[in-house]
Amino acid sequence: MRNLLEAKEAIRQLQTTLNATLLGKSQIVDLVVACLLAGGHMLFDDLPGLGKTTLAKALAVGIGGKLARVQCTPDLLPSDITGFSILNPKSREFEFRPGPVFADVLLADEINRATPRTQSALFEAMAERQVTIDGKTHPLATTFIVIATQNPVESQGAFPLPEAQLDRFAMKLRIGYPDAASELKMLANMIGVPHQPTAPSACCFQPVQLAGLLNHVATIAVEHKVQQYLVNVAVASRNHPAVALGISPRGLIMWQRISQAWAFLQGRDYVTPDDLLDVAEPVLALRLAGDFDDVQPIMHDILSRVKVPV
């Protein structure tokens, strides 16, 4: 119990740290923390300059992990992400040089500017937390997560992420512009600072603590009627005339896990239908093909057709 209480305090510290980094976006911060506790990967579909990179840095520091950043471009190779083997002239043996994927938090900036071949280099890492190179499997950190960004405005020279890869993310988020008060506070904080702000240096977690929390969140109770509601929503999405591909079984599992994490953040050891609805938008927006804004009315229509259990 003591370890769990200490972990909960670490979560509160992490939320405070992230809120100090991303001003006026407490809802986004809570969703990011829930995604972290669910062991999920995040896709930020948003404009440049809104704090995505700074948020990723703060998250990596907060969990006591290593951050690696990859700027995705059309000439980026799969080995630039996963690593490669190189011949050692002295030993005359091949040695493995790990790539940036061997980190706790991998920031894939503008992921849709990488070619599909390079994007696919993340498939195994995101799904299995391992990479296979030259026939040898290399495990990644148990808490490994990917934070990917893409610009929804510029499409020239971009390669849209295939549905198979989108489904490996837990949620799609948009930070959006801050409110006026938050922007004023941000400007005030920059007085006397000669460069762009960096992420806070406070470490809230130890890696072992985080791994234990992920295991605990997976045990949060989900009643049969709540699981039946999940299945009913998935079936409704697959039969909706405006949806080409409905929610996959993988998507359902991730929705349940995110809801477990959300319930944990609310201080409960069981999931309610409200937990499912609270996290439905970022989870479903990722899995209903189309523009972020276009899928919202479709998502709301699907949810309105399915009776919420009481």
Image: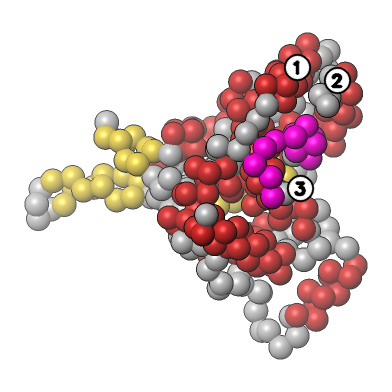
Q: Over which residues does the magenta segment extend?
A: 267-278
Mark 3 surroundings: few (<14), some (14-19) or many (≥20) residues within 10 A = some
Q: Quadrant of residue 85?
A: top left
User: What whole-number distance in Å separates the C-alpha atoms at marks 3 and 1?
Assistant: 27 Å
Q: Amino acid at mark 1?
A: Asn
Q: Residue furthest front?
A: 1
Establish if 44 lies above or below 122. below
Farthest-out residue, bottom: 192
Q: CA distance from mark 3 to mark 2?
A: 28 Å
Which quarter of the image is occupied by the C terminus?
Answer: top right
Numbered mark located on residue 232 in the image: 1
Residue at 59% x, 25% y is 250
Residue occupying the point 75% across, 34% down: 272
Question: In the picture shown, does residue 247 fall above or below 160?
Answer: above
Q: Is residue 162 visible?
A: no
Between 289 and 153, which is closer to the camera in this rendering? Answer: 289
User: Is 60 left or right of 185, judged from the image as shown?
Assistant: left
Element type at mark 2: loop
